[in-house]
Amino acid sequence: MAKIVECIPNFSVARDTAVLAELEAAARSVPGVTLLDSAPDLSHNRTVFTLVGSPEGIKDAAVKLAKLAAQKIDLTKHSGEHPRMGAMDVCPFVPLKDVTMAECVEMSKEVGAAIAAEAGIPVFLYEDSASSEGRRNLAAIRKGEFEGMAQKMEQPQWKPDFGGEQPHPTAGVVAVGARMPLVAFNINLSTSDIEVANKISKVIRGSSGGFKYCKAIGVMLEDRNITQVSMNMVNYEGTPIYRVVDVVRAEARRYGVSVIGTELIGLAPAKALIDCAEYYLQIENFDYGKQVLENHILGFVKE
């Protein structure tokens, strides 16, 4: 059976369409790799790629994209609502088919070493690849962002796993790791008051005592003059999307604010969305495998 790995590199660019087009072309040029999705966000000035392919192809694509991003993206001139520390900010590997998490961890280490050697970018390993418990959480690595990373890396505990002891002067650093699928999901609010979004984010964020598998920050969308609760749902079964949406809606009412829309960034597992449909429609005795037409057909074909 063919092994399939997913890779979801995040780039600190969205407004420069020429650079984005070059990155997309580079991703498509690697044999054995398919670019399933490119999701730019102008307010965040950030783009999320979703790649799938063979382990060897995915490794080649990740290194090629990191090198190109370092050449084309200058963080000294970058601005955006999303926290960032690198031109290629983060590069996770996710096992999809006939690949183990251990294999993805090994892939992340090989890619991290290659990025440091070939692009001159320091690399921090995170999530299941982390070299210490304090580096599992991406937010802990990214804290200080690009502007504060040089001072941060002077501390012994923040020496990178690969590469030099100073960030790349324009491309910063990158976090590389292996993890299970997550859902990048945003909720837009009918207010321009960033403090409302910050307070709601704190309520639902796991590190602040909220939902264990939810990471959340408040973001200002300047082009729309509204705020957003921007989230990574790192375990959509442990913390379902619908549960977080309901709590955000209830918290927003405290401030006379409403939810005016949501955003799905990149791709998500079908079950994460179907679970929401099952919940809100209150379907009794729902069978995910048999009552979703496509799942039933795929199951039949597989048999």
Image: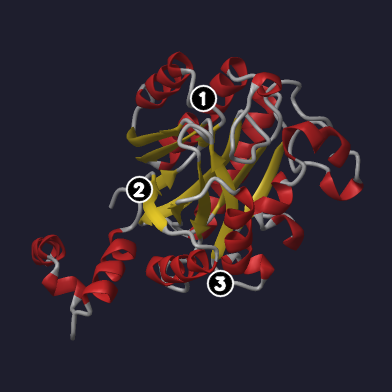
Label 2 and label 1: CA atoms lie apart by 22 Å
Badge 2 local density, few (<14 within 10 Å), some, or many (20+)?
A: some
In primary-sequence order, the first of circles 1 and 3 is: 1
Other residues around mark 3 within 10 Å, as few (<14) / some (14–19) / many (≥20): some
Query: Which residue is nearer to you in this view: 219 or 233?
Result: 219
Residue at which label 3 appears? 211
Residue 141, horizontal then vertical, whole percent: 72, 48
Between 72 and 259, the residue placed more toward the observer is: 259
In the picture of the structure, the residue carrying the numbered disc 1 is 64
The residue most toward the front is: 256
Disc 2 marks which amino acid? Leu
Percent coordinates x, y for residue 94 in the rendering: 46, 52
Quick one: SS at disc 2? loop
Q: Quadrant of residue 87?
A: top right
Please tell me how crowded label 1 is: few (under 14), some (14-19), or many (20+) other residues with Cα within 10 Å.
many
Distance from disc 3 to disc 2, alpha carbons, whole Å, reads 22 Å
Q: Closer to the N terminus: mark 3 or mark 2?
A: 3
Q: Which residue is mark 2?
A: 267
Can you give x and y, in whole percent of width and height, for residue 164 in the image?
A: 80, 31
At x 66%, y 36%, the residue is 113
* Badge 1 amino acid: Lys
* Badge 1 vs badge 3, beta-carbon distance below 8 Å: no
Q: Residue furthest bottom?
A: 285
State the residue in front, 48 or 289.
Answer: 48
Q: Quadrant of residue 277?
A: bottom left
Give the foreground label among 1 and 3. Answer: 3
Q: Mark 1: which secondary structure?
A: helix
